[in-house]
């Protein structure tokens, strides 16, 4: 089967579920009703060609949508059950809905072999952002025991691996590499290292890093999702492409028009979440991918190939240009005459570099301290602050080279 044929079958079989969702939520979700009315679709959406005329809701637009109708922008159905609320950079506020595994990560975990009998070290943040809770809920649904490691405290986490017999890891691939290095640096006995499975996400997994990790962890698989949509794709074998799970409908679209691209061409990942309480229909993630076929002939996503949105992901967290500008504006009152943020990559680790030009007579040490504090508070990423004589244009630039 060709990619074109596989995509046609996927569109026919799964796209119908989005049409059913629109019918069942008509009049119940204010923001979705308004989008339909603006597109002239208030009378109903009866076919996928019409659905594809509904304007994409861009991730970059979510902060404004939520400010216009606080707190959640009218994106939830009336009476939706909410058990937690989270705040991601932007700020973008995300609800956790009731029920088991609401972000649907269980299939990705089970594909990695994670389930009953496993002790999982979850190294995503449990503080404000939803990532930690996402995987916590998924692990519980899969029957695994969770150690809520969060981000930071690598030395303690290495000791926990040895003491508690941790068998699986969830987090950034670069964080797993740092954890292995710390484990060895502490002189902990390698025979006590029992981590044999790792599900990694939120940053690229280049082949050299995967090879480095699999020298210590037998199974390392990649997954892909967002704070708003949950799981979007997951590997079943290394390098096999990302299988799209049940619960979402994925399109690859032209960023300018929101229309699907030719099968196999790159475009923006546009997701519809098939949930009546939170029907996030045609949500533009800002990520670029394309359709491909796995070794089994099934339709897969080719991973995240880049970004089309204004936000930049750093160590699994999005940094938005307007937030970067706010930090720079505040630092102008602390002795900075100019500045910019540059996202770089050193080895297998993302680095957020803050380049600042000090004003004449400014207290350099005080400026650096203020810059570190302001950035951590606003962007939730620790910066490396460089005082320089001049900066190039741009508030937030991505200088990483993925070639």
Image: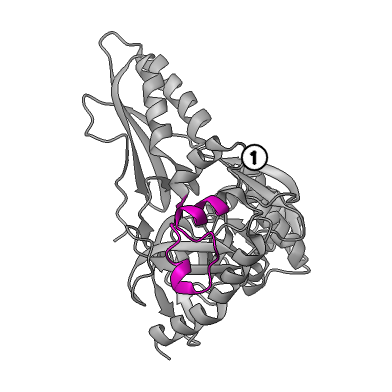
Residue drawn at x 60%, y 48% is 30
Q: What element carries label 1?
A: loop
Q: Residues within 10 Å of mark 1 (few under 14, many from 20)?
A: some
Q: Give residue 4's position: percent from left, percent from top.
A: 39, 84
Front position in the image: 168 or 106: 106
- Assess whether residue 73 is covered by the magenta stretch: no
> Where is residue 114, by image quadrant?
bottom right
Image quadrant in which the N terminus is located: bottom left
The number of callouts visible is 1
Residue drawn at x 27%, y 36% is 394
* Pointer 1 residue: 127
Residue drawn at x 45%, y 61% is 54
The reply to whether residue 241 is visible in this rendering is: no
Residue at the bottom extreme of this rendering: 1
> Where is residue 390, by image quadrant?
top left
- Assess whether residue 40 is covered by the magenta stretch: yes
Q: Give residue 169's position: percent from left, percent from top.
A: 63, 59
Front position in the image: 360 or 265: 265
Front position in the image: 188 or 3: 3
Residue at the front extreme of this rendering: 43
Q: Give residue 138's position: percent from left, percent from top.
A: 70, 61
Residue drawn at x 27%, y 14% is 359
Q: Relative to 315, does residue 23 appear above or below in the rendering?
A: below
Q: 277 left or right of 379? A: right
Q: 43 left or right of 145? A: left
Image quadrant in which the C terminus is located: bottom left
Q: Give residue 339's position: percent from left, percent from top.
A: 30, 27
The reply to whether residue 256 is visible in this rendering is: yes
- Magenta residues (range): 32-58
Q: Relative to 319, does residue 375 appear above or below in the rendering?
A: above
């Amino acid at each position: 089967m060709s990619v074109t044929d596989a995509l046609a079958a996927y569109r026919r079989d799964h796209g119908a579920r989005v049409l059913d969702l629109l019918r069942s939520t008509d009049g119940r979700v204010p923001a979705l009703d308004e989008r339909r009315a603006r597109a002239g679709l208030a009378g109903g959406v009866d076919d996928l060609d019409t659905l594809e005329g509904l304007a994409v809701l861009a991730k970059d637009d979510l902060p404004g949508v939520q400010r216009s109708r606080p707190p959640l922008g009218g994106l939830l159905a009336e009476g939706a059950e909410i058990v937690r609320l989270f705040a991601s950079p932007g700020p973008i506020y995300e609800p956790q809905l009731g029920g088991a595994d609401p972000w649907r990560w269980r299939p990705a975990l089970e594909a990695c072999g994670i389930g009953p009998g496993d002790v999982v070290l979850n190294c995503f943040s449990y503080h404000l952002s939803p990532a930690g809770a996402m995987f916590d809920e998924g692990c519980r649904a899969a029957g695994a025991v969770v150690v809520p490691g969060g981000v930071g405290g690598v030395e303690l986490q290495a000791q926990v691996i040895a003491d508690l017999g941790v068998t699986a890891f969830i987090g950034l691939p670069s964080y797993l590499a740092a954890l292995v290095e710390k484990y060895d640096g502490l002189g902990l006995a390698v025979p006590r290292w029992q981590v044999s499975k790792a599900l990694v996400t939120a940053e690229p997994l280049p082949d050299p890093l995967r090879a480095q990790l699999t020298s210590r962890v037998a199974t390392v698989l990649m997954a892909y999702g967002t704070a708003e949509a949950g799981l979007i794709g997951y590997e079943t074998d290394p390098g096999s492409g990302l299988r799209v799970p049940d619960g979402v409908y994925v399109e690859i679209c032209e960023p300018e028009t929101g229309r699907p691209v030719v099968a196999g061409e790159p475009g923006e990942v546009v997701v519809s979440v098939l949930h009546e309480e939170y029907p996030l229909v045609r949500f533009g993630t800002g990520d670029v991918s394309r359709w491909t076929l796995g070794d089994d002939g099934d339709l897969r996503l080719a991973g995240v190939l880049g970004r089309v949105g204004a936000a930049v992901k750093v160590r699994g967290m999005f940094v938005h240009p307007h937030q970067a500008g706010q930090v720079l504006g505040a630092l102008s009152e602390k002795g900075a005459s100019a500045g910019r943020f540059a996202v770089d990559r050193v080895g297998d680790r993302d680095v957020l570099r803050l380049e600042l030009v000090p004003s004449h007579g400014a207290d350099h040490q005080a400026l650096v301290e203020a810059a570190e504090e302001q950035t951590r508070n606003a962007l939730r990423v620790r910066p490396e602050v460089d005082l320089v004589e001049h900066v190039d244009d741009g508030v937030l630039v991505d200088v990483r080279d993925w070639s």
